[in-house]
Amino acid sequence: MITFITGNKHKVIEAENIFKDYDINLEHIDLGYCEPQGTLEEVAISGAKYASRKLNKPVIVEDAGLFIKALKGFPGTYSSYVQETLGNQGILKLLDGVNDRYAEFRSVIGYCAPNSEPKIFLGKVIGEIAVEEKGDLGFAFDPIFYVPAESKTFGELTTEEKNQFSHRKNSLEKFIKWYSIQ
């Protein structure tokens, strides 16, 4: 049993679908924690450490972000805030007339058990920012994150399709492989 600390129901659904392939049960607890200003890794470490000590059990937290090359990595660690304030249309406006639309979704899993130091696991997926929103599946930036290998945005992929290669799948699988041999 793994305890996943998040307030994002979409992340829980994606994680549950990934964990079931490994016969690992996932418990979800929405435990708010203070996120320091810093990298995805720093946020995941801080959150995992806090939650593990507060609940006195092993936990995972996940922090993710969209990193756009032409915007020097923006929105990055501010992705959630930018999604709430600018939204997808705001990102598309920032990239109006920009040819280099390279982007990465990155996910960092932070794991911590009581009385131990946290471990982190980074996953990413490479794509580009579409010129318009496509699809109504997924959440947040999914309708503007285009994956050339799939010829679709994340917003056009079902959770099962997205979970074949997503940034979250990559970080969770790295964690699961490590966790399975502990």
Image (tube, rainbow, N blue to C red):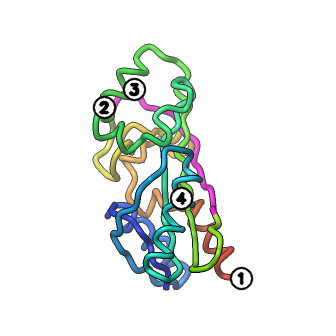
Secondary structure, mark 2, is loop
Does the magenta-highlighted stretch encompass residue 44? Answer: no
Q: Around disc 3, counting alpha carbons within 10 Å, would you say few (fewer than 14), some (14 to 19), or many (20 or more)? A: some
Label at residue 160 = none
What residue range appears in magenta? Answer: 120-132
Q: Nearer the viewer, residue 134 or 6?
A: 6
Q: Around disc 2, counting alpha carbons within 10 Å, would you say few (fewer than 14), some (14 to 19), or many (20 or more)? A: some
Q: Which residue is mark 4?
A: 44
Looking at the picture, how far across and down is residue 152, in whole percent?
A: 44, 43
Label at residue 181 = 1
Looking at the picture, how far across and down is residue 145, in whole percent?
A: 44, 39
In the rendered image, the quadrant that contains the C terminus is bottom right
First-in-chain label (4 vs 1): 4
Label at residue 131 = 3
Q: Which residue is mark 2?
A: 86
Discs 4, 3 touching: Cβ within 8 Å = no
Secondary structure, mark 1, is loop
Q: Around disc 1, counting alpha carbons within 10 Å, would you say few (fewer than 14), some (14 to 19), or many (20 or more)? A: few
Tell which tag, 3 or 2, sits nearer the viewer: 2
First-in-chain label (4 vs 2): 4
Q: Around disc 4, counting alpha carbons within 10 Å, would you say few (fewer than 14), some (14 to 19), or many (20 or more)? A: many
Q: Amino acid at mark 3?
A: Val
Q: CA distance from mark 4 to mark 3?
A: 31 Å
Q: Amino acid at mark 2?
A: Leu
First-in-chain label (3 vs 2): 2
Secondary structure, mark 3, is loop
Secondary structure, mark 4, is helix
Q: Amino acid at mark 4?
A: Ala
- 7 over 65 or under it: above or below: below
